[in-house]
Amino acid sequence: GPWVTGDKASMEQIVANTRQYAGSTDLAIDYDHQTVFGAIPGVGGKAPAAGWIKELQARDDGIFGRVEWTAAASAAIKAGEYRYLSPVFFHEKTTGRVLAIRMAG
Protein backbone atom coordinates (compact mmCIF):
# COMPACT_ATOMS: atom_id res chain seq x y z
CA GLY A 1 0.00 0.00 0.00
CA PRO A 2 -1.15 2.56 0.27
CA TRP A 3 -4.04 1.50 -1.95
CA VAL A 4 -6.19 4.07 -3.72
CA THR A 5 -9.77 3.63 -4.93
CA GLY A 6 -10.51 7.25 -5.78
CA ASP A 7 -13.91 8.90 -6.01
CA LYS A 8 -17.27 7.23 -6.65
CA ALA A 9 -16.75 7.25 -10.43
CA SER A 10 -13.41 5.48 -9.94
CA MET A 11 -15.04 2.93 -7.64
CA GLU A 12 -17.79 2.34 -10.23
CA GLN A 13 -15.01 1.57 -12.73
CA ILE A 14 -13.45 -0.89 -10.25
CA VAL A 15 -16.84 -2.63 -9.95
CA ALA A 16 -17.20 -2.71 -13.76
CA ASN A 17 -13.65 -4.10 -14.15
CA THR A 18 -14.41 -6.72 -11.51
CA ARG A 19 -17.57 -7.81 -13.33
CA GLN A 20 -15.60 -8.08 -16.56
CA TYR A 21 -12.86 -10.11 -14.81
CA ALA A 22 -15.26 -12.46 -13.02
CA GLY A 23 -17.87 -12.80 -15.73
CA SER A 24 -20.81 -14.76 -14.35
CA THR A 25 -18.69 -16.32 -11.59
CA ASP A 26 -19.23 -15.18 -8.00
CA LEU A 27 -16.12 -13.92 -6.20
CA ALA A 28 -14.88 -16.30 -3.52
CA ILE A 29 -14.35 -15.46 0.12
CA ASP A 30 -12.06 -18.02 1.71
CA TYR A 31 -10.61 -18.65 5.15
CA ASP A 32 -7.23 -17.06 5.88
CA HIS A 33 -6.43 -16.42 2.19
CA GLN A 34 -5.86 -20.12 1.56
CA THR A 35 -6.85 -19.71 -2.10
CA VAL A 36 -3.78 -17.51 -2.51
CA PHE A 37 -1.38 -19.18 -0.07
CA GLY A 38 -2.54 -22.81 -0.10
CA ALA A 39 -0.10 -23.73 -2.88
CA ILE A 40 2.93 -22.64 -0.84
CA PRO A 41 4.65 -25.70 0.70
CA GLY A 42 4.10 -25.89 4.45
CA VAL A 43 1.29 -23.32 4.51
CA GLY A 44 -1.76 -25.30 3.53
CA GLY A 45 -3.51 -27.11 0.78
CA LYS A 46 -7.25 -26.69 1.17
CA ALA A 47 -9.18 -23.56 0.35
CA PRO A 48 -12.84 -24.07 1.22
CA ALA A 49 -15.17 -21.21 0.49
CA ALA A 50 -16.55 -19.24 3.42
CA GLY A 51 -18.91 -17.41 1.13
CA TRP A 52 -19.50 -15.85 -2.24
CA ILE A 53 -19.71 -12.21 -3.23
CA LYS A 54 -22.91 -12.13 -5.24
CA GLU A 55 -23.08 -8.42 -6.01
CA LEU A 56 -20.89 -5.31 -5.75
CA GLN A 57 -21.99 -1.71 -5.47
CA ALA A 58 -20.00 1.52 -5.49
CA ARG A 59 -21.20 4.09 -2.96
CA ASP A 60 -19.84 7.46 -1.93
CA ASP A 61 -18.04 5.88 1.03
CA GLY A 62 -16.67 2.69 -0.55
CA ILE A 63 -17.38 -0.50 -2.43
CA PHE A 64 -19.93 -2.77 -0.78
CA GLY A 65 -20.75 -6.38 -1.51
CA ARG A 66 -23.72 -8.64 -0.92
CA VAL A 67 -22.35 -11.92 0.42
CA GLU A 68 -23.91 -15.36 0.61
CA TRP A 69 -22.15 -17.12 3.51
CA THR A 70 -21.80 -20.87 3.87
CA ALA A 71 -23.42 -22.42 6.94
CA ALA A 72 -20.00 -23.06 8.51
CA ALA A 73 -18.81 -19.49 7.94
CA SER A 74 -22.07 -18.06 9.23
CA ALA A 75 -21.66 -20.05 12.44
CA ALA A 76 -18.00 -18.99 12.78
CA ILE A 77 -18.95 -15.33 12.31
CA LYS A 78 -21.73 -15.59 14.90
CA ALA A 79 -19.28 -17.24 17.30
CA GLY A 80 -16.85 -14.35 16.86
CA GLU A 81 -14.17 -16.51 15.20
CA TYR A 82 -14.06 -14.22 12.17
CA ARG A 83 -14.88 -10.54 12.04
CA TYR A 84 -13.29 -8.70 9.11
CA LEU A 85 -12.75 -9.17 5.39
CA SER A 86 -9.44 -8.73 3.65
CA PRO A 87 -9.83 -7.98 -0.06
CA VAL A 88 -7.47 -9.25 -2.72
CA PHE A 89 -7.34 -6.98 -5.72
CA PHE A 90 -5.46 -6.14 -8.88
CA HIS A 91 -3.66 -2.80 -8.68
CA GLU A 92 -1.11 -0.62 -10.41
CA LYS A 93 2.26 -1.30 -8.82
CA THR A 94 3.58 2.25 -9.07
CA THR A 95 0.52 4.18 -7.87
CA GLY A 96 -1.39 1.66 -5.73
CA ARG A 97 -4.56 2.43 -7.71
CA VAL A 98 -7.02 -0.44 -7.36
CA LEU A 99 -8.13 -1.83 -10.74
CA ALA A 100 -10.46 -4.74 -9.84
CA ILE A 101 -11.37 -7.00 -6.94
CA ARG A 102 -10.21 -10.61 -7.25
CA MET A 103 -11.62 -12.16 -4.06
CA ALA A 104 -11.51 -11.76 -0.27
CA GLY A 105 -10.28 -13.69 2.74
Image (tube, rainbow, N blue to C red):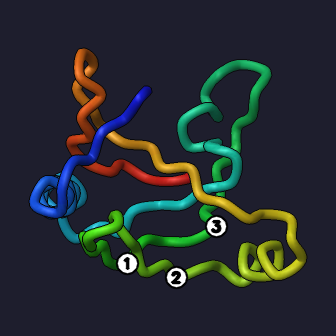
Front residue (pair 24, 98): 98
Find the distance from the CA under tag 1 to the CA under tag 2: 7 Å
In 3D space, how far apart are the residues under numbered discs 3 and 2 (Cα atoms)? 9 Å
Q: Which residue is drawn at 56% across and 43% down?
A: 35
Residue plotted at (52% across, 82% down): 68
Tell me the quadrant of the picture where the N terminus can be found: top left
The quadrant holding residue 99 is top left
Whether the residues at callouts 1 and 2 have beta carbons within 8 Å, the answer is yes
- In the foreground, 8 or 69: 8
- Which of the two residues, 42 or 13, is positioned nearer the viewer here? 13
Q: Distance between the residues labelled 3 and 1?
A: 13 Å
Q: CB of mark 3 within 8 Å of CB of mark 1?
A: no
N-term mark: 3 or 2:
3
Query: Which residue is label 1 attached to?
Result: 54
- What amino acid type is highlighted by mark number 3? Ala
Residue type at tag 2: Glu
* First of labels 1, 2 by sequence position: 1
Residue position marked by numbered label 3 in the rendering: 50
Task: Locate residue 50 relative to residue 23 in the image: left or right.
Answer: right
Identify the mark at residue 100; answer none if there is no mark. none
Relative to 15, does residue 67 appear above or below in the rendering?
below
Residue 56 lies in quadrant: bottom left
Label 1 is placed on what type of residue? Answer: Lys
10 Å crowding of disc 3: few (<14), some (14-19), many (20+): many
Please give the name of the residue rendered at 64% of the width and 34% of the height, measured from the top-left corner. Answer: 38
Task: Give the image location of residue 32, x and y in percent.
Answer: 70, 46
Question: Residue at label 2?
Answer: 68
Give 36 or 9, whichever is nearer the viewer.
Answer: 9
